[in-house]
Image (spheres, rainbow, N blue to C red):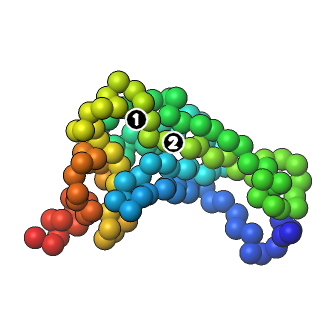
Amino acid sequence: MRSATDPEVPELGPDPVIGGYACHTRCLSRMAVYAESVSVNEARAMVQELFKSATEVADEDIRIKTLYPWDLDMERRTEKILMAAYWTKNYRRSKSEDRNRTGLFLCASCQSVFPQVITEKQVLCEGCRASRS
């Protein structure tokens, strides 16, 4: 087990760290926001900004978790280390059968996140498509 004083244990900076889970089509089904502190409203605003108003992000799509040293297999005092906000795309709402619903995708070139209709086969964001034209 690592000690909290081990120089290999990274300290979380002032900006949140955002990660996501994408399938082979590059569609993001889950995102995680790691920060010293994060609320449902802050996490929802971050995800909503990525969607660019193409779909609604609801509070019930966001889960907050506080991570303690034992969650990360670290020897440290008992106070929290960081918080995580998890967003999962919820397809169970009224538009679940709509083939034209919007999802978030990870650009195959620049790794940015962009919204598009889930039946589209585009793997590049608008900026990367424009630069290749």
Image coordinates of residue 100 in percent, x first then y, are: 22, 38
Q: Quadrant of residue 57?
A: top left
Image coordinates of residue 77 in percent, x first then y, are: 89, 53
Q: Which mark is residue 54?
A: none
Residue at figure coordinates x 48%, y 56% from the top left: 21
Q: How many marks?
A: 2
Q: Residue furthest front?
A: 97
Helix, strand or loop at label 2? It is strand
**Vertical placement of residue 81 versus 8, above or below:** above
Measure the C-alpha gap from mark 2 to mark 1. Answer: 12 Å
Q: Quadrant of residue 39?
A: top right
The answer to whether residue 119 is left or right of residue 80 is left
Q: Do we see residue 11 in this rendering?
A: yes
Question: Where is mark 1, residue-wise?
Answer: 91
Mark 1 surroundings within 10 Å by alpha-carbon count, few (fewer than 14), some (14 through 19), many (20 or more)? few
- Which one is in front in this view, the residue at disc 2 or the one at disc 1? 1
Residue at figure coordinates x 23%, y 57% from the top left: 121
Helix, strand or loop at label 1? It is loop
**Vertical placement of residue 101 versus 29, above or below:** above
Image coordinates of residue 78 in percent, x first then y, are: 88, 49
Q: Which mark is residue 87?
A: 2
Q: Name the residue type under label 1.
A: Tyr
Mark 2 surroundings within 10 Å by alpha-carbon count, few (fewer than 14), some (14 through 19), many (20 or more)? many
The answer to whether residue 80 is left or right of residue 55 is right
Residue at figure coordinates x 15%, y 72% from the top left: 132
| Front in this rendered view, residue 60 or 80 | 60
Q: Residue furthest bottom?
A: 7
The answer to whether residue 36 is left or right of residue 27 is right
Image coordinates of residue 1 in percent, x first then y, are: 86, 69
Residue at figure coordinates x 59%, y 37% from the top left: 63
